[in-house]
């Protein structure tokens, strides 16, 4: 097994909240597997972070575009954060956001094949950008939402320019309430989503594999209690239900007061507006989410290059 690096220990500490030595030991036991190490620390009760890793490893921008009852979020990655500040790159992100919005696209391939202007496709423009900027770029993912009546509202956290930044959120509200009411509610919900990182709209939408993973962690912890098997199973199911409640958007406590479930926030807004409001769906794109990026030792690379 290769030596555990300081950067890996640092990453695990940030993800889990565990101490340095506990993080190092967990990495040694899991042979450097970050995800497995997080689970191990949680099993031992040494991790304070319960959410799935949302590693911001890749660079680039998340762009959002909305038009009344429809909206689109798109992630365009680059190799370095310098490119994300490049005017040419930002113009491209803004333009492809509008292209994706017009197509109601949900696949990167759909956007890449679409016309960028009168003389080239999005793919051709992207290829040209790579050549002129001198760095690889890719449209990683895209997701569109729409409602029959109501509004799709967007929010960008850590904005680098209008409509683009580190986290892009869309909220789809189905309602006949006035636009101002829906825009205000949608903005609050979008800010909550950016901060709280829900994994699904409601508990039924949670990924089965994720729930099984949580069930395994809970069973391992509960089995160490020494309680009878039937009690252990009740403890496990209770832990899984708690996880589901904390990670489904509609049951999460609103970040602005820390207690009101999002479903009640929507219901209160509907009552005040005198019109039903349905939180139909949402999108949350965080730049580089789930992508692992190799961290290199720049000083060592320079030394190696000069033969030091």
Image (tube, rainbow, N blue to C red):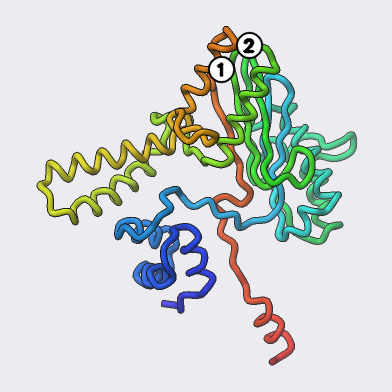
Q: Where is residue 253 in the image (x, y as percent from the top left)?
A: 46, 33
Q: Where is residue 105 in the image (x, y as percent from the top left)?
A: 67, 31
Which secondary structure lies at badge 1?
A: helix
Q: In this view, does 255 lie above or below 300?
A: above
Specify the farthest residue to the front: 257
Specify the farthest residue to the left: 228
The answer to whether residue 45 is left or right of residue 275 is: left
> Which quadrant is the C terminus positioned in?
bottom right
Neighbour tally class for label 1: few under 14, some 14-19, many 20 plus, Cα within 10 Å: some
Residue 177's tag is: 2
Residue at 35% x, 60% y is 46
Q: How far apart are marks 1 and 2 (CA)?
A: 10 Å
The front one of 146 and 164 is 164
Residue 118: quadrant of the picture: top right
Depth-wise, is mark 1 or mark 2 nearer the camera?
1
Residue at 67% x, 35% y is 155
Q: Position of residue 278 (x, y in %)?
A: 53, 17
Which secondary structure lies at badge 2?
A: loop
Neighbour tally class for label 2: few under 14, some 14-19, many 20 plus, Cα within 10 Å: many
The front one of 42 and 122 is 42
The front one of 1 and 223 is 223
Residue 109's tag is: none
Q: Is residue 114 above or below residue 87?
A: above
The residue that mark 1 highlights is: 269
Residue 270: quadrant of the picture: top right
Q: Position of residue 49 (x, y in %)?
A: 43, 53
């Amino acid at each position: 097994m290769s030596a555990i690096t300081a950067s890996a220990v640092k990453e695990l500490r940030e993800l889990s909240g565990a101490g340095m030595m506990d993080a190092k030991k967990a990495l040694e036991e899991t042979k450097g597997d970050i995800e497995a190490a997080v689970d191990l620390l949680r099993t031992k009760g040494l991790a304070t972070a319960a959410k799935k890793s949302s590693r911001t490893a890749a660079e680039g921008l998340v762009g959002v575009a909305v038009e009344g009852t429809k909206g689109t979020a798109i992630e365009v990655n680059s190799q370095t954060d310098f490119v994300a500040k490049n005017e040419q790159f930002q113009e491209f992100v803004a333009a492809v956001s509008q292209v994706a919005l017009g197509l109601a696209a949900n696949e990167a391939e759909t956007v890449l094949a679409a016309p960028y202007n009168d003389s080239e496709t999005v793919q051709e423009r992207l290829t040209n950008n790579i050549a002129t900027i001198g760095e690889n770029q890719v449209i990683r993912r895209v997701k569109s939402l729409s409602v029959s009546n109501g509004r799709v509202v967007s929010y960008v956290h850590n904005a680098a320019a209008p409509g683009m930044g580190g986290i892009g959120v869309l909220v789809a509200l189905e309602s006949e309430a006035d636009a101002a009411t829906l825009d205000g509610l949608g903005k609050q919900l979008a800010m909550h989503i950016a901060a709280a990182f829900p994994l699904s709209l409601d508990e039924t939408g949670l990924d089965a594999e994720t729930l099984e993973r949580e069930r395994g962690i809970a069973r391992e912890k509960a089995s160490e209690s020494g309680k009878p098997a039937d009690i252990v199973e009740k403890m496990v199911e209770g832990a899984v239900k708690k996880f589901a409640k904390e990670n489904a958007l509609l049951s999460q406590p609103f970040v602005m007061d820390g207690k009101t479930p999002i479903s009640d926030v929507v219901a209160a807004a509907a009552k005040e507006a005198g019109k039903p409001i349905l939180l139909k769906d949402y999108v949350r794109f965080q730049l580089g989410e789930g992508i692992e990026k190799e961290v290199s030792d720049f000083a060592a690379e320079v030394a190696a290059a000069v033969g030091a």
